[in-house]
Amino acid sequence: VEKIDNPTNLKWSTPNSGVLVINEVGYRKEAAPGQLATWVRAAPLFTSSRYIDYAVGGRSTGNYGAYFLADHQFVQLAPVDGQAARGVYAGVTAMYAPPEFNRFSQYYELRLYGIGLLASRPRDMLSLVVSRNVFSDDLVDAALQQGQLAHDASLSITAGYSATIAPGIRAGVGLGYTDHPTPVVYTPQTG
């Protein structure tokens, strides 16, 4: 065990790290008998951290991001107290971060899901999610200029079922497919 003579000399920082600010705003209406659930949220993100700048090299500040998510219940299966959340929902997501600082620059998602589709399993969820990741055009361009193979995006489709086993304990199973599952650069073997 190493003895620390002066604990005030400890450095509680990480190189190139800075402050991250997220300011989410939104609107949420819970499901109630005869009232469908809605949840919309969005936020800008700002950071003073020094990121690798894929466009010019070195490290720079100025990274930021933004996101928007919306979900709405459009079918209510049991419009009674305690069961109003059971139903069918649809949602969308859009996220953006500048490609000069972020390997994944854009993310889009469409989702369709049901909660409590079976009366005997009111908290279970069945979902179908389609998502698209757009890679940094700066990284893609750099890879192509070096003669490497590169994808500009990936597409995923996932179906899943999540079951409530006990309060706070869930088990899930899913099946997914991803087109271009590599992070930007790939080889002929990985396709």
Image (cartoon, rainbow, N blue to C red):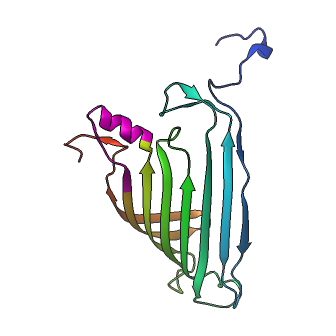
Q: Position of residue 36 (x, y in %)?
A: 66, 84
Give whichever of 14, 132 is nearer the camera: 132
Quadrant the N terminus occupies = top right
Left or right for 160, reference 37 = left
Give whichever of 140, 113 is nearer the camera: 140
Quadrant in which residue 187 is drawn: top left
Left or right for 22, reference 66 = right
Q: Position of residue 49 (x, y in %)?
A: 64, 32
- Looking at the image, which residue sits at the far left? 189
Query: Relative to residue 185, is residue 133 depicted above or below?
Result: below
Give whichever of 139, 103 is nearer the camera: 139
Left or right for 183, reference 66 = left
Quadrant in which residue 24 is drawn: bottom right
Q: Position of residue 142 (x, y in %)?
A: 37, 35
Query: Relative to residue 132, is residue 161 depicted above or below?
Result: below
Give whichever of 15, 47 is nearer the camera: 47
Residue at 46% over, 72% down = 127
Q: Position of residue 79 (x, y in %)?
A: 65, 91
Could you tell me how many numbered marks the image carries? 0
Residue at 52% over, 24% down = 58
Magenta segment, which residues? Answer: 138-154
Does the segment drawn in magenta span residue 141?
A: yes
Query: Relative to residue 57, is residue 98 depicted above or below?
Result: below
Does the segment drawn in magenta span residue 66?
A: no
Residue at 63% over, 80% down = 85
